[in-house]
Amino acid sequence: MDGLQLPFNSHTVGTWRNINSGTGSDEVQYSADESCLIEWKGYEDPVRRDAIEPRIQAIASLLCCVDSVSGFRILRCKGYYHKPDRNAFGLAYSIPKSLTDRTITVSTLKWFLLRGEKSRKNLPDLGTRLSLAHALSSAVLGFHNVSWLHRRLSTAKVLFFYDTTQPLSALTEPYIIGFSYSRKNEPSAFTEGIDPNPQERDYLHPRYLKNDERFEPGFDYYSLGLMLFEIGVWKPLYDMIPPTGSAESIAKELLTEWMPVLKLRAGIEYSNCVKACLDDSLLKADPPAGAAAERSDEDNSTAIYLKFSESVVQKLARLSGYKI
């Protein structure tokens, strides 16, 4: 894959080699080398390594079984390995097969938004933006439906593979990365602290930033809502929020000062989908009529997923012309 460029430091390009078993020979047989994207998850000490590895193994097992066809918009995971000299685990992701024989570039959604600021010819049309928004929201729902939380959604965690002559054509084929912080949506699942990266923190829900609550599905929807706002107006988040404002001020600034711009550029229905993600209305699901007041955590999560599907994913599907 000559010409592959990566605009971030937490990922590198590597080579994956599978061992073929069952050949009837004592000699080890290898398959052809395959270019892959390596996502690194570092640790500070052996105690933390021992806590992280089972989760990395679980993430790899899950991502080995999904692909973009099912709507997950995730690169297929080849497996993981431990690199002691780097104090890190590496998750290896396959590059889409349709792209492996071409000279391509890899960029993030964040990069495309910055590029759009420089020239109007870099602005995608409304149909492309609606399709991108639906693809991302559907992917988040798919991940939640298998009881996993992403926990670090941002425009820096959305990848596009494209030919440099037609970059905008790739925007309807996003791939979500950044699963090194992901975990099962279970009370007993190992969890980590807040990412120290300031721009990553801007995408985290204010309640989670207080560091007194475990991550919950609605917090992923909040992060997604910020991304959908950026997609709707095609402007980076930090160009719309005060540089020294509080975490609570981010959604407030967008929903008051920038909402008229969003409605103008993406429409009222799209704006309502974004608002639902940002105003905390998806954090708790209303109990169905006649249902018992007490529900299990699993039942409550399922109800929240359903509310997100109805309030955001299905509406974006209709707006984008996607056949439900």
Image (cartoon, rainbow, N blue to C red):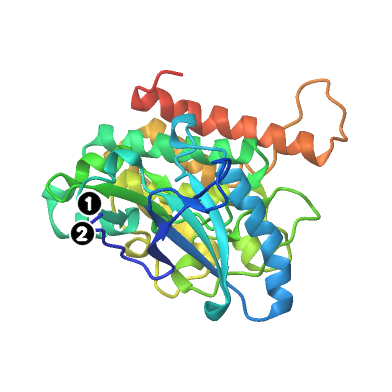
Circle 1 residue: 104
Circle 2 residue: 3
Q: Amino acid at mark 1?
A: Ile
| Mark 1 closeness class: few <14, some 14–19, many ≥20 residues within 10 Å | many
- Would you say residue 202 is visible in this rendering? no
* The one of 32 and 186 positioned closer to us in this rendering: 32
Image position, residue 178 (x, y; %): 49, 57
Which residue is painted at 71% across and 59% down in the image?
A: 54
Quadrant of the image occupied by residue 271 = top left
Q: Amino acid at mark 2?
A: Gly
Which residue is painted at 39% across and 62% down in the image?
A: 14
Image position, residue 146 (x, y; %): 65, 38
Quadrant of the image occupied by residue 320 = top left
Quadrant of the image occupied by residue 168 = top left
Question: In this image, 287 relative to 120: left or right?
Answer: right
Which residue is painted at 53% across and 38% down in the image?
A: 66
- Would you say residue 15 is visible in this rendering? yes
Label 1 close to label 2 by CB (< 8 Å): yes
* The one of 170 and 265 positioned closer to us in this rendering: 170
Q: Using the image, determine if residue 12 lies above or below residue 93.
A: below
Quadrant containing the N terminus in the rendered view: bottom left
Which residue is painted at 78% across and 38% down in the image?
A: 298
Image position, residue 299 (x, y; %): 78, 34
Give the total of numbered labels. 2
Q: Using the image, determine if residue 202 lies above or below residue 76.
A: below
